[in-house]
Image (cartoon, helix red, strand yellow):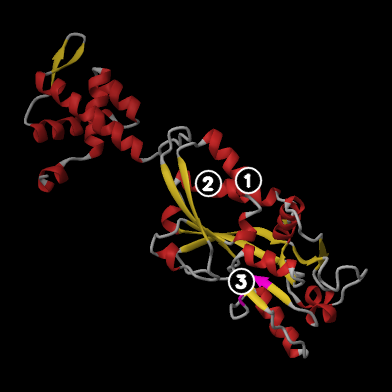
Amino acid sequence: MNLNEILKLDIKLLVAFITILEEGSVSRAAERLGVTQPALSKSLQRLRETFKDSLFTRQAYGLSPTARAIELSDMIKPILNSLSDLMHPSALNLETLDRKFRIKVNEGDLESFIEPLLAELQYKAPGLRLSLSSNDELNFDDLLSAQTDMSIMHASETPGNIRSKLIGYMDSCVILSETNPLFHQKEVTFEDLLNHRSVTHHLPLNCINSLSVTANKLKNQGYCIEPTLETDSLMVAMQAVKRGMSFFAPRSIGELFLNVISTKPNFYPVRLIPMPKEIIELDEHGGNRPLQICWHERSNNDLAHRWLRERIIYFMRESPWMQVPE
């Protein structure tokens, strides 16, 4: 690539050349380009000097291109078409899309969109592949290093090159099985729950999120917020519930428990109760968890990335467990 030669070229000169060629007249080409005839004549003179050829000869019916001009037009037209394409993003064809997207999302949040998303991908984008893994709260390293394409989490603040959009607020609940002494009580208080064994799923109290802030407020009021079991495994949590532990979880997980347990033999009935009023009153989001979808600035205008994240947002907001912001 000879940069010095390329820098001598002016895109406007190339446009002028093709327009004169198509019109066969400097005056008509000038009118089409919205410039004066003398200005376009100067451009034609520069073209002749650049390509060291007269390019056009005058005939009775107008200008006739030289052999060199015809040769140049075959090379210049594709260049101008390519430059025009640079100004417009390529169209997204879901049917031929062949991409893999890596998403970090916790299991309770995944439950709110994965079923309709997989159904849509099967019919609209069969070549789109997903890699799903659990998310660490407030960890943007994988997004920054391009190891992850998008992340769904509670993120009140993000680095400058990470974009985010609030999806909504995930409802929360407490899951009890019949083996829990509280199962048959009409009303279950916060004190009742604290006095019995409990299990939490993806609820790290050392993270700076709304739930940990609320937990600290409760501790300041003298409550002992220490779950018997913390786990990122739903199988473990399910066994804990079976053995009488109270499970603080997103509503989507509660509904999943109801569906799964109803089909499992030898499993005790399960009941969902609202989050205790003590949590609702102290929590800035009423006991529900705000969820954002986060992605790196580099992917913001990627058509396939944008389509996928917008579909995820849509399905999550359609979920019965999500409160959508106005």
* Residue at image mark 1: 115
| Label annotation for residue 245 | none
Location of residue 152 in the rendering, given as x and y in whole percent from the top left corner: 57, 60
Q: Residue at x 10, y 23 (%)?
A: 68
Q: Earlier in the sequence, mark 3 or mark 2?
A: 3
Q: Nearer the viewer, mark 3 or mark 2?
A: 3
The answer to whether any part of residue 325 appears in the image is no
Amino acid type assigned to the residue bearing label 1 in the image: Glu
Label 3–label 2 contact, CB within 8 A:
no
- Please tell me whether mark 1 sits on a helix, a strand or a loop: helix
Which residue has dot 2 on it? 308
Q: Residue furthest top?
A: 60
User: Within the image, what quadrant is residue 137 found in?
Assistant: bottom right
**Residue 202 counted in the magenta span:** yes
In magenta stretch: residue 246: no
Observer-nearest residue: 256 or 251?
Answer: 256
Label 1 or label 2, whichever comes before in sequence order: 1
- What percent of the width, then of the height, locates residue 39? 24, 33
Query: Number of marks in the image?
Result: 3
What is the magenta range?
200-204
Give the mark, 3 or 1, whose residue is nearer the N terminus. Answer: 1
In this rendering, position of residue 89 left or right of residue 111: left
Q: CA distance from mark 3 to mark 2?
A: 29 Å
Badge nearest the viewer, 1 or 2: 1
Q: Position of residue 220 (x, y in %)?
A: 74, 90
- The residue pinned by badge 3 equals 231
